[in-house]
Amino acid sequence: MSYLTGNYCHLVDKGLVRDTNEDSAIALVNAYGNVLLAVADGMGGANKGEYASNYLLGYLKNEFLNLEEEIENPKAIIKWLNNKIKEANEDIYEKGESKEDFKGMGTTLSLCFIVKDNLITAQVGDSRIYLLKDNKLEQISVDQTYATYLLHHKKISESEVAVHKKRHMLTNAIGTKKTCNVDINLYQYNKERILICSDGLYNNVSSLIIESIIRGNDSLDKKCQELIAFGNANGGSDNMAVVIWESK
């Protein structure tokens, strides 16, 4: 049994501009003490984006809670995650192809699976995963956007990414194609605080404010509420999803 103890909180808010909420979030521990944290930001408008993000996290939650045996080997976890995410991708894609109302829907995914001192992350799209290291917030996921693609190919500078006209154009998403690529990474986990959020949060709240809230001593519920409140105070231009984990 690889039981890891800690506290977690997740909160979703539709913001002040959008009519519907297409963001989803989960944070849970299964019977083996494994931790699963995830945010999904749906796209496609109205019920399409909401369906995609809810279906994806609901599918992963069910598979995670109903694991028939404990998975401790990081390579086995990576294989399991890759398979389950791709299964959900195919389900969402087929739903979109079979019903005109759902055509073109998709979702991002930023996910953490923690077992013992291993942190496995899965990334599709532009939601983000942060760790608090030495009281500094560090983004460990890589945004899968066209602007980030240009940056990596040295076509634009880092300062240009935040203002580029195609900074919101995704280069990867779940459900938009029959197959998807999942960026999965393994890290040594040293009980750092973890934040996962959708772009609606980090586009409306500065990294300094996010860092200050995450490293503070407030309860996790209050931290989630403070992050959302700052996002809405700065315009609330998009849905916002937040997950925070703190190990004991």
Image (spheres, rainbow, N blue to C red):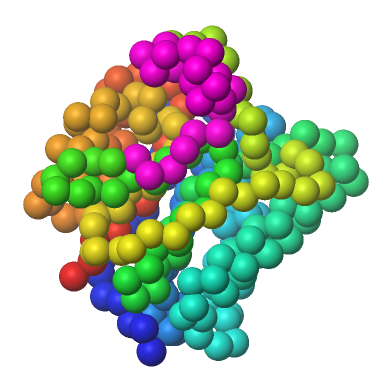
Residue in the picture at 44% in, 84% down? 31
Nearer to us in this view, 181 or 22: 181
Where residue 171 sits in the image (x, y, percent)?
64, 30
Residue in the picture at 14% in, 45% down? 135
Picture quadrant of residue 128:
top left
Where residue 158 sits in the image (x, y, percent)?
39, 18
Q: How many tags in the picture?
A: 0
Nearer to us in this view, 80 or 210: 80
Residue in the picture at 39% in, 73% down? 115
Residue in the picture at 24% in, 64% down? 191
Q: Which residues are magenta?
A: 139-161
Image position of 102 with respect to 165: above or below: below
Where residue 13 sits in the image (x, y, percent)?
41, 39
The reply to whether the magenta stretch includes residue 159 is yes
Image position of 117 with respect to 13: above or below: below
Quadrant containing the N terminus in the rendered view: bottom left
Quadrant containing the C terminus in the rendered view: bottom left
Q: Residue furthest left?
A: 217
- Whether residue 236 is visible: no
Q: Is residue 62 left or right of residue 156?
A: right
Q: Is residue 145 left or right of residue 178?
A: left
Nearer to us in this view, 184 or 205: 184
The reply to whether the magenta stretch includes residue 44 is no
- Whether residue 229 is visible: yes
Where residue 90 sits in the image (x, y, percent)?
78, 54
